[in-house]
Amino acid sequence: MNIEDLRSFCLSVPGTEECLPFDDVNLVYKVMGKMYALIPLGTDICSISVKCDPEKALELREQYLAVEEAWHFNKKYWNTLLPNKDMEDSEIKRWIMHSVDEVIKKLPKSKQLEFRALHPGNLQRE
């Protein structure tokens, strides 16, 4: 995967908003106003940072060379995925969707219901 592949996948998530809230070199992806992914631009290494369940975040770091603690994020919840290492594209997409789910489940119940009514069946269930 390259940056355009990552960007296209994030934009395919229903309700996603792409923005540059921090600077002009970090694309942020939000759903229901909450960030679920960040793609840095202008770097030699393609990467995406995503939110994870804390236990799964640690497991991923142990399982894959392609997963690192996310720089400038709470490392308990955020991982950086490095495509083109030892993680398949389908697995990267799965963890992007896991990040969306992590964000949605932290919203108030009314917002969760609103999102799920607009986008039934789009989020993974583990």
Image (cartoon, helix red, strand yellow):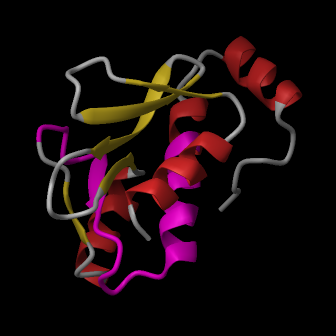
Q: Is residue 82 magenta?
A: yes
What residue is rendered at 28% in x and 55% in y? Answer: 79
Is 45 rendered above or below residue 113?
below
Instruction: Answer with left or right where residue 115 lies relative to residue 60.
Output: right
Q: Quadrant of residue 28?
A: top left
* Relative depth, front residue between 29 and 122: 29
Is 39 rendered above or below residue 84?
above
What residue is rendered at 57% in x and 50% in y? Answer: 8
Residue 30: x and y, percent? 50, 28
What residue is rendered at 21% in x and 34% in y? Answer: 25
Give the magenta-colored segment's residue range. Answer: 72-100
Q: Is residue 90 magenta?
A: yes
How many numbered marks have been drawn onto this rendered protein structure? Answer: 0
Q: Quadrant of residue 113?
A: top right
Instruction: Answer with left or right where residue 36 lies relative to residue 122.
Output: left
* Relative depth, front residue between 120 and 11: 11
Residue 105: x and y, percent? 59, 33
Quarter occupied by the N terminus = bottom left
Quarter occupied by the C terminus = bottom right
What residue is rendered at 33% in x and 53% in y? Answer: 48
Is 50 rendered above or below residue 88?
above
Instruction: Answer with left or right where residue 36 lies relative to residue 25.
Output: right
